[in-house]
Image (spheres, rainbow, N blue to C red):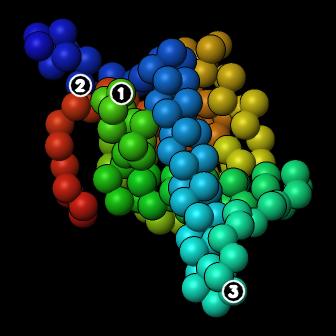
Amino acid sequence: MKHAKEMQGVRAGFVSRTLANGLDAVVVLALELALLLLIAVVRFLFTRLFKLPMLGPTLNVIVYWVIAIIYMTYGWSSTGKTFGKQLVGLRAVSQDGEPLSGSRAFLRALLYAIFLPGFALVLVSRKNLSLQDHLVGSNVVYDWRYRGLGV
């Protein structure tokens, strides 16, 4: 427990952030599947035919990234945490440690969707910042404390 208290507010490294991002990728995939199931159920109510919609590869990627952008924007602008960050004990904040605004969180999410390899900059950055963090003015820090919405 003492080690955790010492790490509070310290910028998170590549491994922790990658683990959180991987968990979030699975969550977004589950949300996309849930959306397809919802569409199939609604279609069933009208046609009595239950069949999952088959999206082409391009549309599938677009739907995945739209869901991811909404998911990340909401998490980062509300509590600073997505589900993956919550499990790993991370929080996305502004450079001064304050919560990200909705527009800043959206821009950060959009930049991740457009140029995911920018995340690799964390490996060589002295401050553990991704390209997206540099552009938006954000940090990802260790934070195991609970803070509700708006706190």
> Would residue 48 appear left or right of 128 to someone viewing this image?
right
* In this rendering, the label closer to the viewer, 1 or 3: 3
Query: Can I make out residue 12 in this image?
Result: yes
In the rendered image, residue 13, in percent from the top left (x then y), is placed at 47, 18
> Would residue 17 appear left or right of 56 to someone viewing this image?
left
> Observer-nearest residue: 48 or 116?
48
User: Residue lying furthest bottom in this view?
Assistant: 46
Disc 3 marks a residue whose amino acid type is: Thr
Residue 26 vertical placement versus 20 (above, below): below
Q: Which residue is mark 3?
A: 47
In the rendered image, residue 92, in percent from the top left (x then y), is placed at 42, 42
Crowdedness near tag 1: few (<14), some (14–19) or many (≥20) residues, C-alpha within 10 Å:
many
Q: Decide which of tag 3 and tag 2 comes sooner along the chain.
A: 2
Q: Which residue is mark 2?
A: 8
Q: Which residue is mark 1?
A: 88
Disc 2 marks a residue whose amino acid type is: Gln
Residue 131: numbered disc:
none
Location of the C terminus (image quadrant): bottom left
- How far apart marks 1 and 3 lie (CA) works out to 44 Å
Location of the N terminus (image quadrant): top left
> Observer-nearest residue: 49 or 127?
49
Q: Secondary structure at mark 3?
A: helix
Q: Which residue is found at the position 42% from the left and 54% from the top?
A: 75
Crowdedness near tag 3: few (<14), some (14–19) or many (≥20) residues, C-alpha within 10 Å:
few
Crowdedness near tag 2: few (<14), some (14–19) or many (≥20) residues, C-alpha within 10 Å:
some
